[in-house]
Amino acid sequence: MQYKTETRGLLSCNKVNNMAVFPSETLVRIESMAAENAVVIFSVSTCSMCHAMKRLFRGMGASPAVHELDLLPYGVDIHRALLRLLGCSSPTSPGALPVVFIGGKMLGSMERVMASHINGSLVPLLKDAGALWL
């Protein structure tokens, strides 16, 4: 994914694939949060798919860092930026959350994670990131 930096007034912003603009501070925050653990899940506390994703990783033996966006003061900004990174056009896009990062790299939302799990590529990703010790 390529980022294009633009300046509007004093605020530096990033454009992703010529979509809506979000502050570069938000992208830096996401990158920092994604790098804090081998598996990071951006979630909403009331989302059943988010709950299923957390259970999947914990059931596999990984201990994900979970960021409940509805409980964070800057969660709305992070949610919007994640939607743009995923290529979603609206906050109500199906499959927008949860968003999973493994080894600091975005794997994607529920659909991508489940496809990786089914095709057998998820466990090697978790092992490479140090999330599993098998």
Image (spheres, helix red, strand yellow):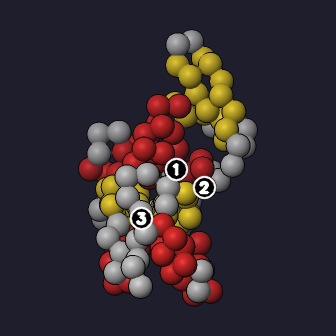
Q: Is residue 55 visible?
A: no
Q: What is the three-letter code of the residue carrying label 2?
A: Leu
Residue 94 numbered tag: none
User: Which residue lies at the image location 49% right of the left edge and 55% below the top edge?
Assistant: 104
User: Secondary structure under badge 3?
Assistant: strand
The mark nearer the N terminus, 1 or 3, is 3
Say whether residue 4 is left or right of residue 118: right
Give the residue number, with chain letter if any, for mark 3: 39
User: Which residue lies at the image location 37% right of the left edge and 58% below the top edge?
Assistant: 37
Give the residue number, with chain letter if any, for mark 1: 82
Structural crowding at the residue carrying mark 1, measured as other residues with C-alpha within 10 Å and reported as few (<14), some (14–19) or many (≥20): many
The mark nearer the N terminus, 2 or 3, is 3
Residue 86 numbered tag: 2
Image quadrant for the C terminus? bottom left
Vertical relation: 68 (above or below) 18: below
Q: What is the three-letter code of the residue carrying label 1?
A: Leu
Q: Is residue 119 visible?
A: yes
Structural crowding at the residue carrying mark 3, measured as other residues with C-alpha within 10 Å and reported as few (<14), some (14–19) or many (≥20): many
Q: Do the residues labelled 2 and 1 touch (CB within 8 Å)?
A: yes
**Cα separation between marks 2 and 1:** 6 Å
Q: Nearer the viewer, residue 59 or 18?
A: 59
Q: In the rendering, at what x and y percent does residue 52 appear?
A: 38, 77
Q: What is the three-letter code of the residue carrying label 3?
A: Val
**Cα separation between marks 1 and 3:** 16 Å
Image quarter for residue 41?
bottom left
User: Secondary structure under badge 2?
Assistant: helix
